[in-house]
Image (cartoon, rainbow, N blue to C red):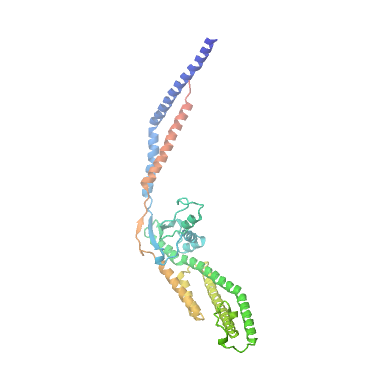
Amino acid sequence: MTDLQNDDSGSQMVPAAVKEKADVREDEVSLADYLIVLWKRKYLILLGSLVPALIGGLTLRVLPRNYKITYAYDRSENAGGRDFTQHNYKTFLDRFYSAENTDRIRAKLPEYEPRMVRFETWPPFVTLSEAEVDTKNPVQLEALSQMKAQLLYVLVVGRDRNDILESASVIRDNFEHVLPLYSVMLEVANAISKYKTGMAKLEQGKFLEELNLKTNQAILARFKNVETASPAKTADYPTWQVDAARNPEYLPLEYQIQAAELQVAKLEENIKANEQMYNYYKDLAAINERLSKELKDNISTGHNYEIQDFRSFLIDLTENSEGRVLEEYLSSYIKSIDNRISASAPVVENPKISSISKGTARKSAIVFVAALVISVFAAFLLEGLKKSQTPVFRN
């Protein structure tokens, strides 16, 4: 039994060793087969890699070169620019690439496509994935959203060096004279909301002020109906120091009457001042509603309506305004529009036109690597098909 067991154990050990050697030999043969296939199909791999890369490179060189012209705009506060935060930048992009604005540009530039224009900021805005901030920390998120750009670059791209100036002129005209109207319209809407909120607050306090006035008037009337005794000699009574503002009831009656009259006068003047302020807010809200109507009616329908047209409307409105207050308000508003127009000018009026690199070497290298992988795969595929079709003879 022992011999049989030994024989059995030996018979189990020998095939394992033989199998391990066979696996090693099989691996060596497989690697050699790979090398043989690569050498055998070397011309297929070489031509399949080089030809597509050469064709791609030649095609890129033959294709017309693209050109670009870059306008830089100062968006810092020192240059009269607005707070150009990341939120405002995204809002600006939405306005520029909107269907309404795109149709307006195509009315003057039929061949316009959104890829013809690109915007960049300096310093560049970063996203949450790029910034090392804690997404659960509201302070860091707020700081990221309030980052400001100092410069805005407008890149206009074209294939014709001569026509790119015409395209850039249309884009500039839209960027500098049309898009600011959207910001003005938003500011006008905020102004209307602010003045109407002020009117609402004055209306809320009006009832309490009138009630307080009536109360003080009633108290004053009762004071005046009180009969007072003849004043006593000051030598028979001690002298008292009284805080008249906090304790007016300790004053002699005639002084209490004077204090009540003073309080009534203050309330009456305060009510008059609030009424004037209410009317002032009302007039400003009305004038801004006219501005809002002018902008909405012309921005949505008028393709040629620009910020200079809005300025002309403001001048006509100022000349026909009634009252010095409204005239001063409109005059001040015209100055703010003038500042906005002057701030819309680029840093360099006539920047140079530069060519855009085609990246021929990099793109050809990418094509070569992709073609090489495909060629190697095709070589092994052809070799496998050839072996599968070869008949096998057995003894």
Snapshot quadrant of residue 361: top left
Q: Residue at x 37, y 47 (%)?
A: 360
Across and down, in percent, residue 363 comes to 39, 45
User: Residue 54 falls in which quadrant of the image?
Assistant: top left
| Residue drawn 57% across the image and 86% down it | 236
Residue sitting nearer the eye, 354 or 81: 81
Q: Decide which of 309, 3 is in the foreground and name it.
A: 3
Q: Nearer the viewer, residue 332 or 48?
A: 332
- Where residue 184 sits: x, y (%)? 49, 68
Expressed as whole percent of the image width and height from the top left, the position of residue 43 reads 38, 34
In x, y percent, where is residue 388? 48, 27
Q: Is residue 394 visible?
A: no
Give the side of residue 380 with respect to residue 267, left or right.
Answer: left
Rendered residue at 42%/35% (across/down): 376
Residue 271 lies left or right of residue 344; in this view the side is right
The correct choice, above or below, for 210 with respect to 57 in the image is below
Q: In the picture, which quadrant includes the N terminus?
A: top right
Q: Among all residues in the image, which is located at the extreme front?
A: 236
Q: Is residue 322 above or below residue 365?
A: below
Disc tally is 0
Q: 257 or 367: which is nearer to us?
A: 257
Q: Along the horizontal axis of the image, is 214 left or right of 336? A: right
- State the residue lying farthest toward the bottom: 230
Q: Is residue 104 visible?
A: yes
Figure check: 307 above or below 236: above
